[in-house]
Amino acid sequence: MLKQIFTPFLMTAVLFSLVFCGPSEETKEIQGKAKQIIGALPEKMPGSENDSEKLISLGKKLYFEKKLSMNESQSCNSCHNIEGKFAGVDNLPTSPGAFGKNGDRNSPTVLNAGFHFVQFWDGRAADLKAQAKGPILNPVEMAMPSEKEVLKRINEDSEYPKLFAEAFPNDKDPVTYDNLAGAIAAFERTLVTPSRFDDFVKGDFKAISKAEQEGFKSFLAAGCTSCHSGNLLGGNSYRKVGLVNEYKTEDLGRFNVTKKPEDKFVFKVPSLRNITLTGPYFHDGKIATIEEAVQKMAYHQLGINLSEEETKKIVLFLGTLADKNRAN
């Protein structure tokens, strides 16, 4: 009789503790470090406060526009696919251009790109607008011969002249290459991807599991934040690839832009946002899996050899940085 009364009482007590008891002290400590060291992703990108709906709408249409490539086979989305579960990349080592030739570097994700301090692996573009101008005229990528030819196609289109006029109402001549790039940049500024990690930082202690929290601790313990810092976990500095142990590559990186000897093999540190969705990895796209990427970065940049268990923990944490709408 006593057992029959006690058992339901015990079950009720357990359920009560699971539902109503707050997070453990350890979880609070981990959340505090996540908030202090990383922080939550902002809801809007810099400059988006000036973007009108018509400007963004025009930018989106241009982002998917194949007329911006010489043989009308490529759009921005071809290499930086944002449709469905795609995370702003094509998931290829390097991307084929309009006439089938591949570029020299892995196509980085366009998601959250407007938060980065510069654009491209070598930082040769200051912002999204400057970046958008490059691929269209690049002979390997979209291969248009000139700005003049690009604008000719836009002006001959049945819709674009009106859309440009609506997006740039104060411009006497709204169809310009600068405005085209500006519209694409405005659309790209909408590509902000909040994650479960952000929910955790903001105080939802159940947003990431205990195992994922342990992964974050391993991420910190390994010293990964020496490069992957701030709310982007990267995207805010340059580093030499092979800082401690040589990484063999013929790509001279930022040196090609600055011609400074100290910039040889220096690249922008990529953001780890959506990193589990954007393989293959590194500037050359030669690293197939996220596990291998984590191990090689630890070895080449930090001089440490991570165990399989440590690697799995860190990868588990990196999964919490994925866009909640794209993560499987």
Image: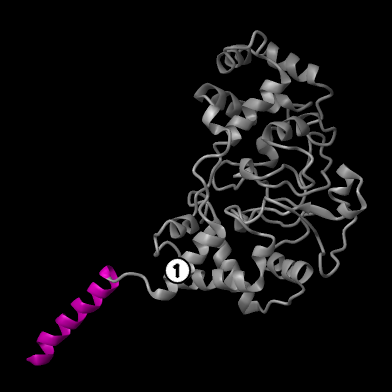
* Residue 64 seen: no
Taking 208 as reference, is 310 left or right?
right
Q: Is residue 45 left or right of residue 267?
A: left
Front residue of 323 and 34 = 34
Q: Which percent across, then down, holds residue 143?
A: 82, 30
Q: Is residue 46 left or right of residue 205?
A: right
119 over 17 or under it: above or below: above
Going by the picture, which residue comes out furthest to the left? 1
Q: Please tell me whether the stretch drawn in magenta is mainly helix, strand or loop.
A: helix
Q: Residue at x 66, y 70 (%)?
A: 223
Q: Which residues are magenta?
A: 1-20
In the figure, 81 relative to 40: above or below?
above
Which residue is more in the foreground, 264 or 97? 264
Please name the residue that numbered disc 1 is placed on: 209
Residue type of the residue flagged with mark 1:
Ser
Quarter of the image for the N terminus: give it: bottom left
The extreme top residue here reads 172
Q: Quadrant of residue 62?
A: top right
Q: Secondary structure at mark 1?
A: loop
Residue 84, compared with residue 32, is above or below; it is above
